[in-house]
Amino acid sequence: MFQEDKEKALKKLKNALEKGLVDKGIIYLLERINEMEDYYTTSSCIGRCGIMEFPKGKNPKVHSRWLGKWHHYGDERDLFEALERRSKDFGMLVFIMNSPILHVASRNIPAAKRLLDLAIHNGLKASSIKSITDKRVMVEILSTYRIDAPIGIDGRILADKNYLKMLLEVGNVKLKKSRELFYRFYRTLENIS
């Protein structure tokens, strides 16, 4: 059952790679994990910074939207162009930095524990086991680096340009550090026994 699911997942990944839908900066790690007998990846993101708009008086899960998001290290132009796309009557604007994230299916609990222990040992301390089923054990790998900073409310931007530039700079630094932790994790994957 695990092997069949792995083959299906790898076929989906191959299709996504051919269509350019996979973050290039994390492919090295996906390839390495998918080569391993007891694991396969199901989803991933190299991490990002951006600005999200939450509407006033509407369900935010349905109606929130990215004004801009960058998987590269953003610059001031990215930031201020995103702000230009805001609605006049937004409920809230939030600057967001998300760590890279990786979901890995493991053959069993011992395999999941080995992967989780290695991730945590390499600084990816927000990693955890997300689910356990008869088919697989799902491990989520990510760092603790994150920013969710409100910058506007009720149609008004409350943060000045210097603060916004500082958020972007700090976001880029945290994104870089979290990506370095993922690379450190990658270099030690051969130590899983």
Image (spheres, rainbow, N blue to C red):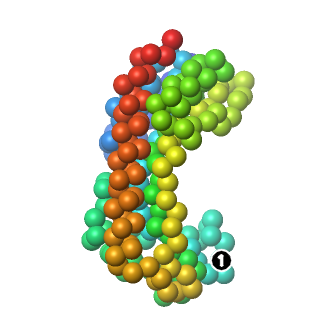
Relative horizontal placement of residue 92, taking residue 183 as reference (left or right): right
Relative horizontal placement of residue 25, taking residue 65 as reference (left or right): left
Query: Closer to the camera, 190 or 104?
Result: 190
> What residue do we see at 46% from left, 31% from top?
122
Relative horizontal placement of residue 163, taking residue 64 as reference (left or right): left
Q: Where in the figure is residue 119, as x and y percent of width and height?
A: 50, 30
> What residue do we see at 67% from left, 24% from top?
135
| Relative to 30, residue 68 above or below | below
Task: Please identify the quarter of the rendering in which residue 92 is found.
Answer: bottom right
Q: Where in the figure is residue 54, as x and y percent of width and height?
A: 56, 73
| Relative to 136, residue 161 above or below | below
For mark 1, what is the residue? 58
Residue 65 seen in this snapshot: no
> What residue do we see at 66% from left, 21% from top?
109
> What residue do we see at 68% from left, 34% from top?
131
Query: Closer to the camera, 84 or 127?
Result: 127
Query: Closer to the camera, 70 or 145?
Result: 145
Q: Amino acid at mark 1?
A: Lys
Q: Where in the figure is residue 185, as x and y percent of width and height?
A: 42, 29
Task: Kindly state the secondary structure of the residue where label 1 is placed.
Answer: loop
Q: Where in the figure is residue 116, as x and y percent of width and height?
A: 57, 28
